[in-house]
Amino acid sequence: MFAIGLGLRLGRIKDFFRQIAFASLIKFLYAPLVGIGLASLFGYRHILGGLPLKVVFIQAIMPAAIWSVIAANLYGLNKDLSTAIWIATTLLLLPLLPLIIWIVKII
């Protein structure tokens, strides 16, 4: 984490607004919908009171992980883009937490 922090350029985040918006739509809308749909299709709603379905939803809606930044560093990909998406999706998760908790309760 320290090495990634040394190469971090927060000013570059605004340069990737479009990519961050698309990644956020995928992480916070498309992936959870697909996850819930597939988990329901496989009958996860009826196992342990729907606990596996809730786990699939929570895993699907989690922000991009630090491993995406590490992979970008290892394979010579766009480090600034992966870092921007990682930071932005993590920060966007915070205001979504009440909604996520509400959805988990009604699933």
Image (cartoon, helix red, strand yellow):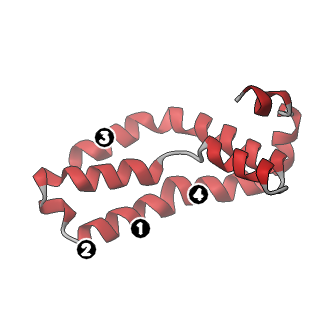
> Dot 3, how many residues are within 10 Å of its Cα: few (below 14), some (14-19), or many (20+)?
few
Type of amino acid under label 3: Trp
Structural distance between the alpha carbons of marks 3 and 1? 19 Å
Residue 91 seen from this side: yes
Whether 97 is drawn above or below 33: the answer is: above
> What amino acid is found at the position of numbered circle 1 in the picture?
Val
Residue at 59 percent across and 44 percent down: it is 65
**Percent position of residue 58, x then y:** 38, 47
Judging by the rendered image, the residue that carries numbered circle 4 is 25
Q: CA distance from mark 3 to mark 2?
A: 22 Å
For mark 2, does the 10 Å Cα neighbourhood hold few (<14), some (14 to 19), or many (20 or more) residues? few
* Label located before the other in sequence (4 or 1): 4
Which residue is under mark 1? Answer: 34
The answer for how far apart the CA atoms under marks 4 and 1 are is 13 Å
At x 20% / y 62%, what residue is drawn? 44
**Amino acid type of the residue that numbered disc 4 sits on in the rendered structure:** Leu
- Which element carries disc 2, helix, strand or loop? helix
Q: Is residue 79 left or right of residue 33?
A: right
Give how far apart the Cα atoms at labels 4 and 3 are.
Answer: 19 Å
**Mark closer to the observer (4, 2):** 2
